[in-house]
Image (tube, rainbow, N blue to C red):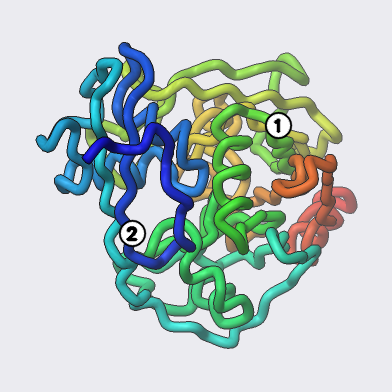
Amino acid sequence: MSLPNRLSTPKPIGMAETFQTVCPESGQRVDAYLASLRKDLSRAHLQRLIKEGHVLVNGAAVKPSAKLQAGDAIQVTVPDVPPSQLTPQELPLTVVYQDLHIVVIDKSPGVTVHPGPGHPVGTLVNALIARYPEMAGVGGEQRPGIVHRLDAGTSGLMAAARSPLAYQSLIRQFRDRQVLKVYLALVRGHPKPAEGVIDAPVGRNPRDRKRMSVVARGREALTEYHTVRRYDGYALLEVRLHTGRTHQIRVHLSTLGHPVAGDPQYGGRVPFLRRQFLHAHRLGFAHPATGEPMEFTSPLPEDLRQALEGLATGD
């Protein structure tokens, strides 16, 4: 029986399905080709399916990087999504905006974004799936709806996806650097020049895997900053992220010689703060369904505002 030359209608995410297609031209990687056809399945998800043997090309398993030839018959089986092991929890959640596709949260400091070693519950994800149960089937099983993260000690704006369409759109916007991400950071000392761009690759510290650092073989990282106000021994910066590496702002500013105040991991320990002075102040992106530009602003939380008032008065 000949295979159809286009994909069958996809079933909803979370249901098992098998679909078939015939590659129309040579040269594409199998993962890239399938990702271009199925916008509801991320490329990372498709690569997992390929590695697990759920994708057959001319009846044989292949690698994600395998190059296709015109006329290759491809069969893909998407297994059932196992029930989530996450525990919904009714936890405090400051919602700035919500609709059927997205939710924007003003995250409190001290809240971990998703479960992991040492914090299996009490995370932002636990709170989100309690309020929005449909998110449990969106994106990764352990990080449903999560398209970017903030460190536990960082407060401020985060967007999360409530639908597969939103998940794919936001992941793509973050990947393509189309998202506005502006932070407020108090640093030790006065950066010179007062504004600039830090372009230095960030990766795991080879001597301490719990820390990140500027390393030659790290991933590209670009941080733009300018000084908003100087205090005695400190400066308030507005920082714009052009990439999104783990601990990027903290590592870059520490490397510059001006660590984020209150950050003991990267040399910013100070007596008047119990956590790092880093706040996700502005967040902007295109709405996943309508394309409408959206931008949100979060004022400094009380603990950081009081810290600035203390510096201004010399207390």
- Residue nearest the observer in this picture, 178 or 245: 178
Task: Name the outermost residue toward the right.
Answer: 313
Residue 99 relative to residue 219: left or right: right
Q: Where is residue 162 in the image (x, y as percent from the top left)?
A: 62, 63
Quarter occupied by residue 132: bottom right
Labels 2 & 1 near each other (Cβ < 8 A): no
For the point 54% across and 76% down, the residue is 129
Quarter occupied by residue 106: bottom right
**Where is the N terminus found, in terms of image quarters?**
top left
SS under mark 2: strand
Task: Name the outermost residue toward the left.
Answer: 60
Residue kind at label 2, given as amino acid type:
Glu
Residue kind at label 1, given as amino acid type:
Arg
Counting residues from the start of the chain, the first of labels 2 and 1 encountered is 2
The residue singled out by tag 1 in the image is: 240
Q: Distance between the residues labelled 2 and 1?
A: 42 Å
Residue 241 relative to residue 44: left or right: right
Q: Where is residue 210 in the image (x, y as percent from the top left)?
A: 31, 47
